[in-house]
Amino acid sequence: MKKFVIERELPGAGKLSAEDLASISETSCAVVDQLGKPYHWIQSFVTENKIYCIHIAESEEVIREHAQKGNFPITAIAEVRVVIDPTTK
């Protein structure tokens, strides 16, 4: 399994209501359940006009399938090669 960062251009994303965000979350989870493939949505970060998502999947193709079935835009997908944090030496 690979980890991906997905950039989604969504004008006004930072102004979405709690109900809108809950609906997006519910749709994403329903699509994950329907995929029938190993897939994990880890979390998403909402900015003013974009949403950045962290997902774990077998391939970029599966990421695109999730987006297509959920009607989620994709601006860019990048595979995470290494994770570092303040404890990295």
Image: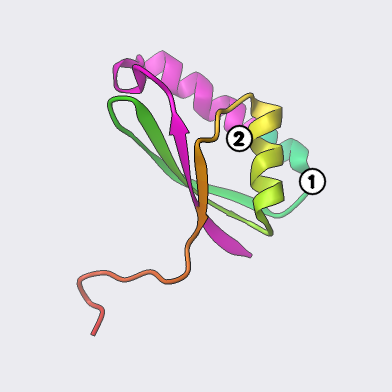
Query: Residue tagged by mark 1?
Result: 36
Question: Residue 71 in the image: x percent, y percent?
Answer: 63, 24
Q: Is residue 61 magenta?
A: no
Q: Residue furthest right?
A: 36
Mark 2 crowdedness (10 Å alpha carbons): few <14, some 14-19, many ≥20 = some
Verify CB contact (< 8 Å) between mark 1 and mark 2.
no
Q: Is residue 10 visible?
A: yes
Q: Is residue 32 visible?
A: no
Residue range (magenta): 1-30
Indicate which disc, 1 or 2, sits on the residue closer to the N terminus.
2
Q: Does the magenta stretch include residue 21?
A: yes
Compared to residue 1, the image places residue 5 above or below, namely above
The residue shown at (65%, 27%) is 70
Which image quarter: residue 65?
A: top right
Query: Residue tagged by mark 2?
Result: 29
Which image quarter: residue 15?
A: top left
Question: Residue 45 in the image: x percent, y percent?
Answer: 35, 39
Q: Nearer the viewer, residue 42 or 80?
A: 80
Question: Which image quadrant: the C terminus?
Answer: bottom left
Question: Which image quadrant: the N terminus?
Answer: bottom right
The residue shown at (65%, 52%) is 60
The residue shown at (46%, 22%) is 22
Question: Residue 88 in the image: x percent, y percent?
Answer: 26, 79
The residue shown at (42%, 71%) is 82
Question: Residue 44 in the image: x percent, y percent?
Answer: 41, 40
Report the side of 52 relative to 60 (left or right). left
